[in-house]
Amino acid sequence: MGNRLSKIYTRTGDGGTTGLGNGERVAKDCLRIEAIGEVDELNCAVGRVLVHDLRDAMRERLQEVQHKLFDLGGELSVPGYQAVKAEDITRLEVALNDFNQQLPPLKEFVLPGGGRAAADCHMARAICRRAERRLVTLAREEEVGDNAQIYLNRLSDLLFVLCRILARDEGGVEVLWRNPSRA
């Protein structure tokens, strides 16, 4: 493959527009670009989790997620195109079940923290939820593949379970919310 990005700046976006994958020019703050940006930020946050010392299975799953998030950004940049498939969601669900079986039942809400990797994973989870909200907003106005929203919903669940595992792996503790009704 040759150089795809031989020139980094093009000046075509200087006026506040950017190009979609289908060649259409849109405002940089339109709903579709907002959603693409949220997915990009989520991918960065997952990358931040990956810099930590992780179990091999966790690392492999998160690397796969990064590739799928890049695909999702591509899907969003070409209205009508669908890159996220039902089997991608199933893969997340299988991983979610496998990782969750390693944990004790949850009796209370967990506050973000528990160690550096767990805290970074909690941040990725929160960004994932924001990306999902942007997709919901976009889907009210424009065509968005159904699998994209479901994928982000499952991914946030997976990230939550990984947060719990990471807190334990780091020797930290899960900080549970002090429910005032039980105090």
Image (cartoon, rainbow, N blue to C red):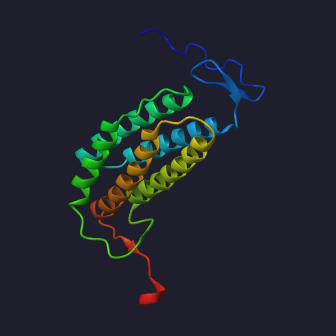
User: x and y percent of residue 24 in the render?
Assistant: 65, 21
- Quarter occupied by residue 69: top left
Tell me the residue at 37%/76% (across/down): 108
User: x and y percent of residue 13 in the render?
Assistant: 72, 24
Residue in front for this viewpoint, 75 or 18 = 75
User: x and y percent of residue 56 in the render?
Assistant: 23, 44
User: x and y percent of residue 138 in the render?
Assistant: 60, 42
Q: Is residue 101 left or right of residue 129?
A: left
Tell me the residue at 45%/40% (across/down): 146
Residue at the far right in the pictured view: 15
Tell me the residue at 48%/26% (across/down): 81
In this rendering, the answer to whether 74 lies above or below 175 is above
Tell me the residue at 29%/66% (across/down): 171
In this rendering, the answer to whether 142 lies above or below 166 is above
Residue at the far top in the pictured view: 2
Residue in front for this viewpoint, 25 or 127 = 25
The number of callouts visible is: 0
Give the position of the C terminus as an image quadrant. Answer: bottom left
Q: Is residue 63 left or right of residue 5?
A: left
Give the position of the N terminus as an image quadrant. Answer: top left
Q: Is residue 180 left or right of residue 162?
A: right
Residue in front for this viewpoint, 87 or 181 = 87
- Quarter occupied by residue 18: top right
